[in-house]
Image (cartoon, rainbow, N blue to C red):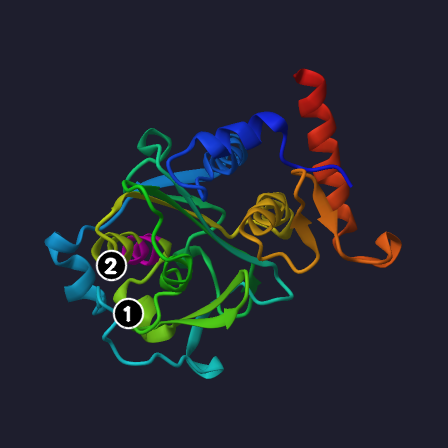
Amino acid sequence: MESSITDKTQKAETQNVFPTDRVKLIERVKLFLSTKDDASYRSSIAMDQGSLVDAFGFASKGKGKAEIVLSEDTAVELGHPSAGSLSMVLMTNRAANIKDNRITVVGPEVWEMDDQTRYPFAQVILLAIDCDTPPDPFEIDRLQFLTNRLPGYMVRSVPGKLWSRISKKGVKAGINLSAIGSAVINAYKHEFENVKAVEVLYVTSSKNDIAELEKVKVEEEILSGQHKKLVLGINGEVECTGLNCDTCAEKPVCDSLRDIVIKRRKMN
């Protein structure tokens, strides 16, 4: 299988301040956004305004109580495996590529949802890092789930996905995607002093939209060595550890990545 990372992209990666710079993947996310007419933009709620703490009980250091939202107490369910789900954190040292404090929502907001529907859910966090060495990737990844930080919001731990519930009490208090995104932005800025800008994208529109972002997610997993089957070889080509492409669930993604590579190489 051909690599989804062109020679040009590889060169860009090696020229970055730290090896986990994902500026090319961030550009892909921004391209995705540019095609969505229903995308809405809003600014985050700042911690110094007191709104996150006073209205929602937000804990910037994760010292809140463990949150359990039972099905009978659930107002909104997001990212159930049957509905489609994705979570991803992408870092860059190029702050110009990040719209600091921006929260973008593609699809319905919480107040447009009902408790009888399982909604698709993707959370993509874009970070601008100002340092020579990236923060601990495990800590960066862990923080996206807001564990014990936002009362009324519960996340189930599913690798690479985000399956969450907002309680009826939480919705009544005003918790929505803007509030959750604000909590994410403030948590990263308070937890990591070298995080200079944070932008958050939420997708609740459809499984198809999440599938588009899944292609970016696969490339990120390959680059970070987290993909179960696809790995980056010594020669820069993506290698598959699977034995039968015809029965592999990753085949549609692989085919799509191969098409991207072919088109890029023709352009070069």
- Where is mark 1, residue-wise? 149
Q: Is residue 54 left or right of residue 8?
A: left
Report how many numbered discs are placed on residues in the image: 2
- In front here: 133 or 193? 133
Q: Is residue 242 left or right of residue 126?
A: right
Q: Secondary structure at mark 2?
A: helix
Q: Is residue 171 left or right of residue 1?
A: left
* Magenta stretch, residue numbers: 178-184
Q: Is residue 85 left or right of residue 45?
A: right
Give the image quarter of residue 171.
bottom left
- Dot 2 amino acid type: Glu
Marking on residue 191? 2
**Where is 2 relative to 189, above or below?**
above
Cα–Cα gap, marks 1 and 2: 12 Å
Give the image quarter of residue 219.
top right
- Residue occupying the point 57% across, 67% down: 80
Residue 244 appearing in the image: yes
Q: Position of residue 264 (x, y in %)?
A: 67, 24
Q: Position of residue 13 (x, y in %)?
A: 49, 34
Task: Estimate how packed mark 1 is, as few (under 14), some (14 to 19) or many (20 or more) residues with alpha carbons within 10 Å.
Answer: many
